[in-house]
Amino acid sequence: MYRLEYCLSFVNTESYEFHDFANRIFIDEKWFYMTEADRSIYLAPGEAPPHRIVQSKQFITKVMFMAAVMRPVFAEDGSLIFDGKLGMWPFTERVPAKKSSRNRPAGTLIAKAVNVGRREQRAMLIDNVIPAIKMKCPAFLKGVPLIIQQDGARCHVEPNDPAILAACRVDGWDICIEMQPPNSPDTNILDLGYFGSI
């Protein structure tokens, strides 16, 4: 029933037109392997191959990323004002290597995947997603209510989280968080093949 109410909320009952989703920001998480065991890479003449190091091809590190996108904004003449890509950020921390290896000396800063819980989600939203929205969105969206839509995973922040609400209201922005309907991944554009395309 909640899914039906969610869908009907985007229909204008007077004109029977759909909402244009211009003020909705979609966020989602995705696991990616740091590299692949067998991978073809095409290089331009003079381009150096990427530096790829793993301890074993059977234990390639997986890292969770958070992506945020919204609908692109076009001018009346059809020119692109904003492409809709807000960013993609890894859930990692930089820690010094405890031991030296043939690849690096001890003490070299390396990226290490972190366990993602509610605290990490909150930090990701406050430190990366919300500043990216304020920096990349066109200026005319500053007074418009913007909605960050996330799925209902247990580790996600609550829509009424005080730290998130404070960060969303700074500098005259009107941003809020909303959960998508349960068992409805098709209501988030990132679950409709976006990650498969990159």
Image (cartoon, rainbow, N blue to C red):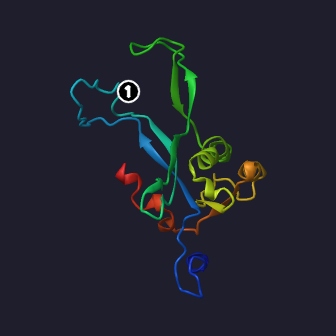
Q: Quadrant of the N terminus?
A: bottom right
| Above or below: residue 62 compared with residue 10 | above
Q: Residue at x 75, y 58 (%)?
A: 160
| Above or below: residue 117 compared with residue 147 | above
Q: Kindly state the secondary structure of the residue where label 1 is placed.
A: loop
Left or right: 67 with respect to 168? left
Left or right: 24 with respect to 145? left
Q: Residue furthest bottom?
A: 14
Q: Residue furthest front?
A: 77
Q: Position of residue 52 (x, y in %)?
A: 35, 27
Q: Position of residue 51 (x, y in %)?
A: 35, 24
Q: Residue at x 60, y 78 (%)?
A: 9
The answer to which quarter of the image holds residue 2 is bottom right
- Choose between 77 and 23: the one closer to the eye: 77
Q: Residue at x 55, y 39 (%)?
A: 91
Residue named by callout 1: 54
- Choose between 168 and 80: the one closer to the eye: 80
Q: Position of residue 69 (x, y in %)?
A: 51, 54
- How many tags in the picture? 1
The answer to which quarter of the image holds residue 54 is top left
- Mark 1 neighbour density, 10 Å: few (under 14) some (14–19) many (20 or more): some
- Amino acid marked by disc 1: Val
| Above or below: residue 136 compared with residue 49 | below
Q: Residue at x 59, y 66 (%)?
A: 180
